[in-house]
């Protein structure tokens, strides 16, 4: 326990140093810029990764599930910055496919809208780790900066609940929210399916399954989604080691989540493998340049566009996977989050015209 606390203390110090040290010093200390596939890693991110490597923190795939969950939540809380001001936070439960599911509802401060647009958010974590608590600061930020309510879903995790439990929970959460929205002061016609990493996968699959609903989702907001669990794109090779999320981590997550390797081909596990993407909600797809999942996220955006779906894709080419949880440590991550929220606000505004 003492060693774990020391590692967490080092992570916190790394975050503070990466944020505050002059960039000229950072460039000297880190050495030559890291470059992959024609992209150059953000200097502060490069130094942060070096400091994290020196902390002795084990990679996720070398931890047990319980320890990985604890470390991931601690990591998120250390690096996500100060709490953004929101008007109200309410914890409650909804009826899920296999029993009650916890949700957390965030409402923006000073809103005068009778019915708020809502971000239905599914956290990242490879379908194995992540929680409402770990993503609390990120969800506060999304609520405060977007002017939307945020409903964060504590979907079931593997290995206790294998595929497709998380997907079933995501679809059920949307249907529950659409039915209860007006009573909650939310707009049932402006529900955004959103998530990062594995949560982006849940949002993408839910958008496919919900396209024929009487009130389908108005947008899908996918942040570096895991669009194909095959893990055989070029970015899995070029970015699969040394940039926080590794190819070995992805294989560990996949082994915990799937019942058999054959499920990789199921479009609910790998939404990129769906045969028909027509009619799904318009999409905002954001990827990171130094991310094993980069190429599959790009490919999914192209497939959506080819199917006639309005799709906006942007790559933050200097950043790594997981930057949603690094707003307090890395200025480039903070700018990226500002840009993503601005894009969401713009697309929501277009819906009313």
Image (tube, rainbow, N blue to C red):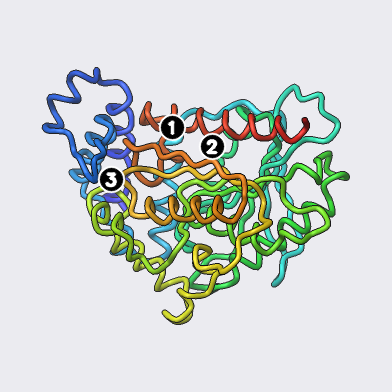
Is disc 2 placed on a helix, strand or loop? helix
Counting other residues with Cα less than 10 Å from the Cα at mark 2, is it few (<14), some (14-19), or many (20 or more)? many
Residue 137, which numbered label? 2
Give the distance between the C-alpha atoms of the residues marked 2 and 3, in whole angstroms.
21 Å
Q: Which residue position holds label 1? A: 327
Q: Is residue 169 above or below residue 90?
A: below
Please state if 200 lies on the left or on the right of 308 as rendered: left
Callouts 2 and 1 close, C-beta under 8 Å: yes
Of badges 2 and 1, the one in the foreground is 1
Camera-nearest label, 2 or 3: 2
SS for tag 1?
A: loop
Labelled pair 1, 3 in contact (Cβ < 8 Å): no
Residue designated by label 3: 7
Which badge, 1 or 3, is on the more N-terminal residue?
A: 3
The reply to whether the C-beta atoms of the residues labelled 2 and 3 are less than 8 Å apart is no
Which x, y percent locates residue 189? Answer: 80, 44
Residue at 69%, 62% (x, y): give it: 171
Numbered circle sitting on residue 345: none
- Image quadrant in which the C terminus is located: top right
Q: CA distance from mark 2 to mark 1?
A: 10 Å
Sequence order check, earlier mark of 2 and 3: 3
User: Disc 1 vs disc 3: which is toward the camera?
Assistant: 1
């Amino acid at each position: 326990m003492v060693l774990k606390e020391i590692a967490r203390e080092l992570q916190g110090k790394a975050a503070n140093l990466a944020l505050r040290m002059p960039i000229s010093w950072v460039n000297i200390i880190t050495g030559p810029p890291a470059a992959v596939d024609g992209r150059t890693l953000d200097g502060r991110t490069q130094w942060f990764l070096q400091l994290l490597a020196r902390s002795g923190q084990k990679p996720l795939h070398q931890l047990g599930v319980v320890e990985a969950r604890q470390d991931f939540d601690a990591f998120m809380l250390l690096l996500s910055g100060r709490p953004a001001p929101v008007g109200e936070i309410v914890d409650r439960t909804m009826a899920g496919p296999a029993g009650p599911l916890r949700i957390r509802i965030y409402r923006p401060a000073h809103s005068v809208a009778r019915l708020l647009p809502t971000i239905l958010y599914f956290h990242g974590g490879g379908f194995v780790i992540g929680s409402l608590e770990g993503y609390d600061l990120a969800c506060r930020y999304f609520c405060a900066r977007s002017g939307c309510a945020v409903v964060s879903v504590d979907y079931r995790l593997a290995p206790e609940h294998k595929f497709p439990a998380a997907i079933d929970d995501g679809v059920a959460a949307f249907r529950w929210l659409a039915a209860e929205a007006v009573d909650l002061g939310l707009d049932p016609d402006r529900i955004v399916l959103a998530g990062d990493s594995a949560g982006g996968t849940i949002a993408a699959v839910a958008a496919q399954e919900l396209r024929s609903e009487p009130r389908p989702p108005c947008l899908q907001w996918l942040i570096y989604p895991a669009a194909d669990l095959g893990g055989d794109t070029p970015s899995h090779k070029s970015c699969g080691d040394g940039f926080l999320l590794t190819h070995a981590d992805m294989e560990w997550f996949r082994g915990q989540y799937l019942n058999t390797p054959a499920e990789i081909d199921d479009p609910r596990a790998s939404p990129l493998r769906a045969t028909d993407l027509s009619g799904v909600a318009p999409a905002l797809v954001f990827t990171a340049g130094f991310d094993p999942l980069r190429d599959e996220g790009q490919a999914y955006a192209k497939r959506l566009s080819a199917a006639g779906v309005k799709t906006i894709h942007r790559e933050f080419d200097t950043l790594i996977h997981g930057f949603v949880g690094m707003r307090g440590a890395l200025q480039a991550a903070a700018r990226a989050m500002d840009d993503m929220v601005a894009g969401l606000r713009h697309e929501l505004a277009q819906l009313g015209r």
